[in-house]
Image: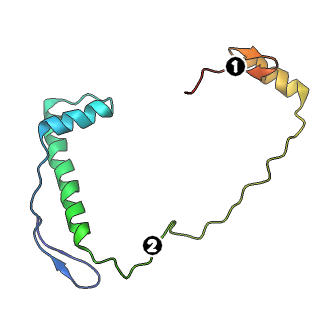
Amino acid sequence: MGGFQFSHGKMYGIVAHTMITKEEVQHIAKLARIQLSREQVEKFQKELSQVLDYFTILQEVDVLSVEPLTHSIEVKNVLREDEPRKADPEVVQKLLGMAPEQKDGFLKVKSVF
């Protein structure tokens, strides 16, 4: 990997190459619930190692004078008030009729927790 130059002109040299192990790639694949071939493990070992090298470069950048951002553009609350509304009974019955289970006029779903 060669050097990198940022817009402020500071040059960053060659990064010490951090190679993650094949076992780490297989562990990440297991967490992601994907199966990788031997060739894919080797490919991702190199690619993920390069990503980690870029983080090393980013850690060298002086950001003390940069104001923290929570969002790249100004965001304002565009939500409406949460007010109950009367639903069309015909639409409600049609929707409930399509549900696999219902109870007391509501959709019955599996517990999330």
Kindly identify the residue that appears in the image at 45 percent across and 72 percent down. Answer: 68
Q: Which residue is mark 2?
A: 68
Amino acid residing under circle 2: Pro
Q: How many marks?
A: 2
In front here: 59 or 91?
Answer: 59
Residue at 61% in and 66% down: 75
* Residue carrying label 1: 108
Mark positioned earlier in the residue sequence (1 or 2): 2
Query: Which image quarter is the N terminus in?
Result: bottom left
The location of residue 9, given as percent across then percent down, is 23, 85
Query: Gap between marks 1 and 2, in whole Å?
Result: 44 Å
Q: Residue at (26%, 28%) from the top-left corner?
A: 35
Disc 1 marks a residue whose amino acid type is: Lys
Q: Residue furthest bottom?
A: 9
Identify the image quadrant of the C terminus.
top right
Return the x and y of residue 42 as percentages of the image width and height.
13, 39
Mark 1 lies on a secondary structure that is loop
- Quarter of the image holding residue 5? bottom left
